[in-house]
Image (tube, rainbow, N blue to C red):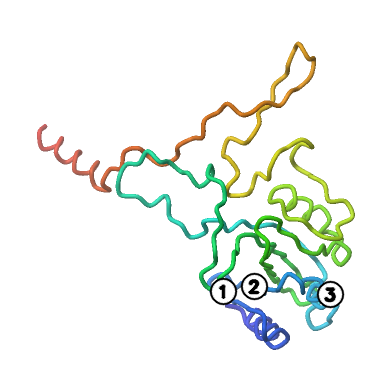
Amino acid sequence: MSQSMVDLAAELRQRYPDYPVRHDSRTDEVTLEVPADQIRAVAETLKTDSGLAFAQLTDVCGVDYLAHGDAEWVTREATARGYSRGVKPYDGRNDPDQGSPRRFATVYHLLSLSRNQRLRVRVWLADTMFPVIDSVQDIWPAANWFEREAFDLYGIHFSGHPDLRRILTDYGFIGHPFRKDFPISGNVEVRYDPEKGRVVYEPVQIQPRVLVPKVIRAADSSVAAGEEKSADA
């Protein structure tokens, strides 16, 4: 744990006493959680205040916390249900501490060149059906393409963005592929139709894959089998 990051966490707690500040001693990372309606005001301060000077934005990304912490992979018996998290629609998930849905968040990674410090800013988005937050593109121009990426992959809308269009998927793409409830096989498939002389979109024919093993063996079963075989020999 570096003293520099300890000092940064203490300074942020003093400046923003109402906002959670977390310092992970294992990774030496500082995270500041900001309300969605305050992101622009906080961003301006983080960039322009000489005591912080986070002049560079290195990344903006979306996060989908749907089923976060659920251990569907941990199982003691065979199952035919499969890894269903990616094929079932979102049915609403409430945060037990907040009493309201907490599914989507935007995360900003900042760098202060003058102080040689990095900061992670996380913003929870209140509306899980239409997540929206103010754009910071005019504060950090590098946010332009990052925000378009988060819009494309997660469906997060950035209010005030000058050109919020898809950037990685096709223009006719349906849905947002990084959402946890997006079908593993997608919604449509593409093929060339020789009669129409063009590419056509059709409903996907691939069945969702089952990713949970059908047979669960004890951890020492192979060892025991090997010992038994050796004994017979």
**Kind of residue at badge 2:** Thr
| Mark 2 or mark 3: whose residue is earlier in sequence | 2
**Residue at image mark 1:** 24
Which residue sits furthest left?
Answer: 232
Graded by Cα atoms within 10 Å as few (under 14), some (14 to 19) or many (20 or more), the crowding at tag 3 reads some
Which of the 4 quarters of the picture holds residue 117?
bottom right
Please tell me how many numbered marks the rendered image carries: 3
Q: Secondary structure at mark 1?
A: strand
Q: Is residue 157 above or below residue 102?
A: above
**Residue at image mark 3:** 44
**Kind of residue at badge 1:** Asp
Q: CA distance from mark 3 to mark 1?
A: 25 Å
Q: Quadrant of the N terminus?
A: bottom right
Q: Secondary structure at mark 2?
A: strand
Q: Are marks 2 and 1 in contact (CB under 8 Å)?
A: yes
**Residue at image mark 2:** 31
